[in-house]
Image: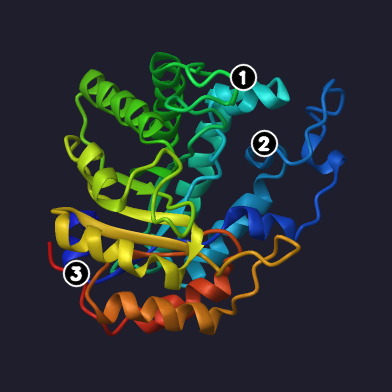
Amino acid sequence: MKDIKEILKERILILDGAMGTMLQRYKFTEEDFRGERFKDWEHPLQGNNDLLSLTQPEAIAEVHRKYFAAGADIVETNTFSGTTIAMADYYMEDLVYELNYESARIAKMVADEFTKKEPNKPRFVAGSIGPTNKTASMSPDVNDPGFRAISFDELRIAYKQQVEALLDGGSDILLVETIFDTLNAKAALFAIEEVKEERNIDVPIMVSGTITDASGRTLSGQTAEAFLISISHIPILSVGFNCALGANQLVPHLEVLSTKSEHAVSAHPNAGLPNAFGEYDETPDQMAEQIKEYAEKGLVNIVGGCCGTTPEHISAIAEVVENFAPRQF
């Protein structure tokens, strides 16, 4: 199989779109989330999308298939909340290894199906590592700015468990994404380096931050350049931004990364900004037209979609960037 680093030099790679948006189409009920295995669980489980890798594995595989069929080179595992920290909401900390392992296994199985059909277009699995619902550099309590709900070490331990399971399940890449607090990301990156050293392996790492508003900063207050500098000591495959903003609003921040970074640059924005009902209205054509600007300006190596995006969005994006050369790095 061709090395992903080589392919990045040849063309712009396509990342998948939103898993959550696709799962909403199934209209799964509490019973569906529970399945047979968790039917007597004492706590509500609806909304725990990562759990669907165990209770509705066919649906997860189908979503991956749709994204690969739409032109994706890389799909993300269904593990955005796959840490003991996030799973504590459902009292499911003990299931973390299995959730990550199974999610990676399902994605890898589907990737292999597509690679077999088109050996000239190998498909990859990115183990999705989300930010958790706690932050290491800000206080959740306005009356106690020095308080922290979690420590660097607690994050590192939780991320390490997730990383090991994602790799055991067959992930080709690790994607630390939707980073709103760079200290959390550093804990994840530290954990990845630990696992790489212990296992004596090398694994490509994608890092993707999120700009939270018009100030052009992450939630923990960093500009695009500051974010880039603070993760640059780690050997990574790509750096980029996802979520929070629509494709248009990301352009200036991608320009900064493109100019300053020695790595590949990725972008998977939302389908515009949410409307009053929290839904995303941007059509595949509208979004693709905006992402075309990234390619025209030579800003990106990897593009995909975040909240509100579907296989239709990914297909339209893949079509418009096909004729553009990737950014040189």
Left/right placement of residue 236 relative to residue 288 reads left
Where in the figure is residue 233, as x and y percent of width and height?
16, 35
> Compared to 280, does 54 lie above or below?
above
Q: Which residue is mark 1?
A: 93
Q: Which residue is mark 3?
A: 327
Where in the figure is residue 310, as x and y percent of width and height?
59, 68
Q: Secondary structure at mark 1?
A: helix
Left/right placement of residue 191 relative to residue 4 reads right
Label 1 vs 2, first from the N-terminus: 2
Where in the figure is residue 1, as x and y percent of width and height?
24, 55
Q: For the residues carrying marks 3 and 2, which lies nearer the camera in this image?
A: 3
The mark total stands at 3
When asked about the image quadrant of residue 116, the answer is bottom left
Q: Secondary structure at mark 3?
A: loop
Q: For the residues carrying marks 1 and 2, which lies nearer the camera in this image?
A: 1
Quarter of the rendering occupied by the C terminus: bottom left
Q: Residues within 10 Å of mark 2 (few under 14, many from 20)?
A: many
When asked about the image quadrant of residue 296, the answer is bottom left
- Residue type at tag 2: Leu
Specify whether residue 295 is in view: yes
Most foreground residue, 186 or 88 = 186
Q: For the residues carrying marks 3 and 1, which lies nearer the camera in this image?
A: 3
Q: Residues within 10 Å of mark 3 (few under 14, many from 20)?
A: many
Residue at left offset 43%, top offset 61%: 268
Gap in angstroms between the C-alphas marked 3 and 1: 41 Å
Label 3 vs 1, first from the N-terminus: 1
Most foreground residue, 180 or 114 = 180
Residue at left offset 86%, top offset 39%: 31
- Residue type at tag 1: Glu
When asked about the image quadrant of residue 82, the answer is top right
Q: Which residue is mark 2?
A: 51
